[in-house]
Amino acid sequence: MDESGTTAFPTAVIVMGKEEAGAVLDEELRTRLVESVTVTDGWDALGEADVLITGWGCPALTERTLAGAPRLRAIVHAGGSVKWLVPEDAWDRGIVVSSAADANAGPVADYAYACVVLASKQALVTAAAYAARGGDGGWPRFCERQGADGRTVGVIGASRIGHRVLARLSAADAGYRVLLYDPYVSVDEAHRMGAEKADLETLCGNSSVVTLHAPDLPATHHMLDAHRLALVPDGGTIINTARGALVDTEALTAECRSGRLSAVLDVTEPEPLQRGHPLFSLPNVLVTPHIAGAQGTEVRRLGLYAVQEVERWVRGLPLLGRVERRDLRTSA
């Protein structure tokens, strides 16, 4: 209660880039937000914050930052990973942390699944050959390397995104055979997700399409190295919408330059690649600038998720996107 004896709204402070805030939290969502909390923007109000709403354009929080927010009880991130954003001190103080990573996972899974379909149809090499002929003639319709039906797809990581990709593959009419590598998933769990559990070498050696959905950890650094890339069958495609460091860029460049493998890379190591890198010009490689996640009209999903989390927090309900300290060891 305040000094007059009436119940005071908690104060929510929004810290993100101006352009990002306008897209993620539009007028309708802000109107909905003020039904639960008093809303203020910017660092200057942090000392009055009960809940901090962050997003793209917000710099990493520090212990000093949090020390200037003595009332802070919750951090709600209208974005994906909070590993770079939230310091250990937040959990030490008992501050509840939430992320809209679930809201961002849908667009990434859609993008990755679309890339699997394109890869199954050999879209990159087909388009390059068609363009080289100046659009003259078609493509052999009965080429055995082309088509999705019965294709073996290797999924690396049953993360929140990987899990969604598995669901899309399982529901497809193509009858994909799906191999899953994830050391934290049992054989039975993989089966329930429509996949066969496999070690990384077996997955690479049998998959014509390999899609990555693992976090960037010391154990996953360059998990697709020269040895494992060489196991992927001729004509295979590597799809990376996760983290660039999961793939040895030099080794992948060599495989793609030879024409043996193709790649769709929404993330790279380094990111961005240096100007003039051969991956930009190879006809069997598509490099996109980290667009698999929420873009344009999709970013409102993040704001809606964050607003709903604030509403749950005000009502004392569990947060659906709650991030525990222990989660950081295995998350992106």
Image (cartoon, rainbow, N blue to C red):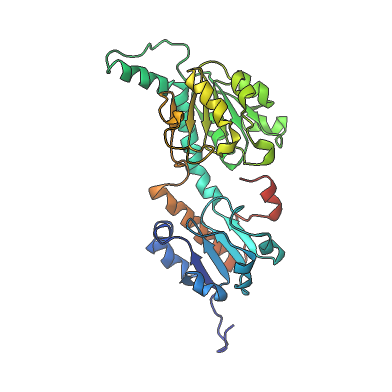
Residue 180 relative to residue 305: left or right: right
How many numbered tags mark residues here?
Answer: 0
Q: Is residue 142 visible?
A: yes
- Residue 67, percent from left and from top: 63, 71
Residue at horizontal 37 percent and vertical 21 percent from the top: 128
Closer-to-camera residue (7/327):
327
Query: Image quarter for residue 191?
Result: top right
Image vertical order of residue 172 relative to residue 78, above or below: above
Residue at horizontal 68 percent and vertical 50 percent from the top: 327
- Residue 215, percent from left and from top: 62, 41
User: Which residue in the rendered view is the most extreme toward the bottom?
Assistant: 4
Closer-to-camera residue (22/141):
22
Q: Is residue 175 visible?
A: no
- Residue 320, percent from left and from top: 60, 55
- Residue 231, percent from left and from top: 62, 19
Image quadrant where one finds the N terminus: bottom right
Query: Image quarter for residue 74?
Result: bottom right
Closer-to-camera residue (122/31):
122
Residue 313 relative to residue 121: left or right: right
Residue at horizontal 61 percent and vertical 29 percent from the top: 224
Image quadrant where one finds the C terminus: top right
